[in-house]
């Protein structure tokens, strides 16, 4: 199963962006979304931003993921 998870764009250099999720940052391709800006929330899948999402929806999704990991047990954690 593959998941697309929301992350916030914190830096852009051409068609590559740096996103942050749970205190971790990574580079992703921005070629698949129109007009990306620092501060946008995007869904990340397989190393690419595939869709913009609004901040409220991103936080709801991250909260649900955190609930799932909490239910899975103490060895799992998701931070926002």
Image (tube, grey):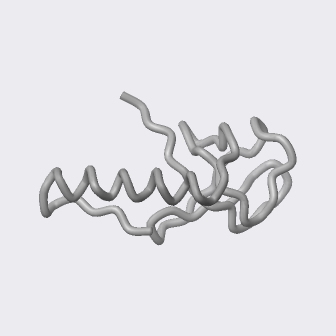
Place residue 29 in its image quadrant.
top right
The spot of residue 43 in percent (x, y) is 59, 45
| Residue in front for this viewpoint, 3 or 60 | 60
* Residue 9: image location, x then y, percent: 68, 61
Q: Residue reaching furthest left?
A: 73
Residue at image position (81%, 59%) is: 37
Residue 20, image x and y in percent? Answer: 57, 64
In the orientation shown, which residue stands out farthest toward the bottom? 23
Q: Quadrant of residue 69?
A: bottom left
Residue 56, relative to residue 51: is it above or below?
below
Q: Quadrant of the C terminus?
A: bottom left
User: Where in the figure is residue 31, as x and y percent of width and height?
Assistant: 78, 39
Residue at 85% x, 54% y: name it: 14
Q: Nearer the viewer, residue 4 or 31?
A: 4
Image point 72% across, 58% down: which residue? 40
In the image: residue 45, left or right of residue 33: left
Q: Say if 80 sits above or below 60 in the image.
A: below
Residue toward you, 14 or 10: 10
Q: Is residue 39 left or right of residue 55?
A: right
Q: In this image, 62 relative to 70: left or right?
A: right
Identify the image quadrant of the N terminus.
top left
Q: Looking at the image, which residue is at 44% across and 37% down?
A: 3
- When the figure is inspected, residue 61 is found, relative to residue 18, above or below; the finding is above
């Amino acid at each position: 199963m593959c998941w697309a998870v929301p992350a916030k764009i914190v830096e852009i250099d051409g068609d590559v962006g740096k996103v942050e999720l749970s205190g971790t940052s990574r580079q992703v391709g921005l070629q698949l979304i129109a007009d990306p800006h620092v501060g946008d929330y995007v869904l990340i899948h397989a190393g690419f931003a595939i869709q913009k999402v609004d901040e409220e929806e991103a936080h709801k999704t991250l909260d649900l993921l955190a609930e799932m990991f909490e239910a899975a047990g103490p060895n799992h954690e998701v931070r926002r």
